[in-house]
Amino acid sequence: MILNLIKNGCEKNIIDTVIRVRYWSDNLQCELERFADLLDACGKGGNRGIGLAVCFGDSYSFSEAEKLEKEYKQKILNELLTLKEEGIKEMEFIRYFYSDRSSLGGVIGGIATNFILDNKKPLFSLVKKEDEIHISCRGNQALVSNGLDLGGAMKKAAMKFDGNGGGHKISAGATINSNKEKEFLVMTNEIISKQLRL
């Protein structure tokens, strides 16, 4: 797996996550990152009660959480396959795609940015909900070291169009009115070009 990641140009910080120290819980009888994944699947699927019961050691809820995790991972796989079929839209300094689920947009963006695409542009997920667009974006360490600040870009662009935005340099999001989509993308593209001094 590591050789394939290297061959595909995956960044070192992502490769380092494959082989690393992992922590086991005797009480939970599972590896703690797996436990976090189960809770994440419960939360993102709207099943917080099951997640809470898992934390209290309920074995039936643990089995239910495993089913939810399997469904959640299948949704991620389906979204990645849709992304492959429908392709990614390209602008000069950013890439973007449309998703049906805001809860998955950032996850898909992170996977695609780190494991599928090259490291030259950040990737934006756009989810249309009635009169709003929810944007989630992901960058990489190479872009951040060259000046990328997605949180700053999202805040500045969203405020320009009476929306809300912010986040971290490598991962951020925004919500804007749906009729401002094109202008928002153009402005974000321009902001990122300045950040990267391109």
Image (spheres, rainbow, N blue to C red):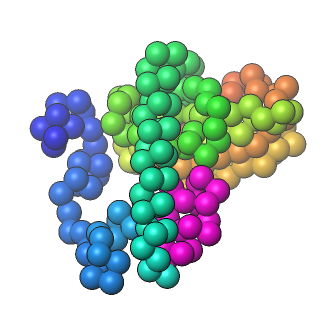
* Quadrant of the rendered image containing residue 38: bottom left
In the depicted view, which residue is nearer to us: 106 or 72?
72
Whether residue 51 is in magenta: the answer is: yes
Residue 52 point in image, percent of width and height: 56, 74
Number of labels in the image equals: 0
Residue depicted at x 44% and y 80%: 57
Q: Which residues are magenta?
A: 39-55
Q: Is residue 167 above or below residue 61?
A: above
In the depicted view, which residue is nearer to us: 159 or 181?
181
Name the outermost residue toward the top: 86
Q: Is residue 132 above or below residue 89?
A: below
**Along the horizontal axis of the image, is 1 left or right of 60?**
left
Residue 48 point in image, percent of width and height: 61, 65
In the depicted view, which residue is nearer to us: 72 or 155?
72
**Along the horizontal axis of the image, is 25 left or right of 154?**
left
Residue depicted at x 48% and y 73%: 54
Q: Is residue 191 visible?
A: no
Residue depicted at x 44% and y 25%: 81
Residue depicted at x 52% and y 15%: 86
Quadrant of the image containing the N terminus? top left
Q: Is residue 134 visible?
A: yes
**Along the horizontal axis of the image, is 116 left or right of 95?**
left
Magenta stretch, overall SS? helix
**Along the horizontal axis of the image, is 62 left or right of 171?**
left
Residue 99 point in image, percent of width and height: 61, 30
Residue 108 point in image, percent of width and height: 49, 38
